[in-house]
Amino acid sequence: MPDTAARLDTALTDPVASALRGRLAGFGATRGAAVRFDPEVSPFAALPLDADGHGSAGDWVDLAALCAPGSEVVVVRAAAGPPRIPAGWELLRAFPGVQMDGAAVPGGAADDVVELGPSDRAEMAELTGRTRPGPWLARTAELGRYLGVRHDGRLVAMAGERMRIGGDGAAGATEISAVCTAPEFRGRGLARRLVDAVAAGIVARGERPVLHAAADNHGAIRLYEAMGFTLSRTMRFDLLRAPHR
């Protein structure tokens, strides 16, 4: 495996740290080895943990310092089980996921797909609030390019870019996220067209599309596999409550 591919593969095991120590540094904060997104952008955070989920006491203290007392944060990492949390922290939800690799996905344009901008933010928040594709906060849309499909002027489906992992160009990857369709418009292939269109933009930059899904979201995983994505690793998106200092 070429060095650049090996470095990207390593970055993809720890996507939050890679993004916030790299191309998305302006969207979060770091303290020691701990990182977390601005809480208006994403609930995601990371810190070094071993294969069994243990981390150093100092790293947990640093992560706590990046969080408001008693606030919620999602620790993201490649692993099979939840983190081993120290006293004061609380595991609210153990959430298994998967990472899917789109190295073989060329993407493609669609005539009915439009680019979304600041004037669309209220509709984007309303659609994600109805469909709950994953965390969507006040500034999430600032992370990348978002595309949508409208019906009679109303936004009924969308998808976009979230974490930017690894370096630029061939050594980088961009995560496709917020894939959602209003319930009354499902079954029309809108999600597939949108993911293809977002992937095409990522590939055009010389990057690799990747995405994450809940491990039990078998319908979404089947769709992505049919598009050419492959399961690359088991991930964790575990919801924690920080200590009440």
Image (cartoon, rainbow, N blue to C red):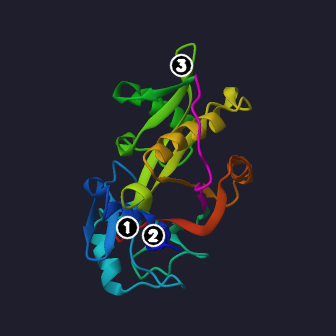
SS assignment at label 2: loop
Q: Which mark is residue 14?
A: 2
Q: Position of residue 51 (x, y in %)?
A: 53, 84
One can see residue 245 in this view = no
SS assignment at label 1: helix
Question: Which residue is rendered at x = 44% and y = 64% of the image?
Answer: 15
Q: Position of residue 136 (x, y in %)?
A: 45, 44
SS assignment at label 3: strand
Classify mark 1: residues with Cα within 10 Å, few (<14), some (14-19) or many (20+). Answer: many
Indicate the quadrant containing the C terminus: top left, top right, bottom left or bottom right.
bottom left
For marks 2 and 3, give the one nearer the viewer.
2
User: Taking 11 as reference, is 70 left or right?
Assistant: left
Question: Which residue is rendered at x = 36% and y = 24% of the image?
Answer: 119
Q: Which mark is residue 17?
A: 1
Q: Amino acid at mark 3?
A: Arg
- Residue 242 part of the magenta segment: no
Please state the extent of the stretch shown in magenta in the rendering. Answer: 99-111
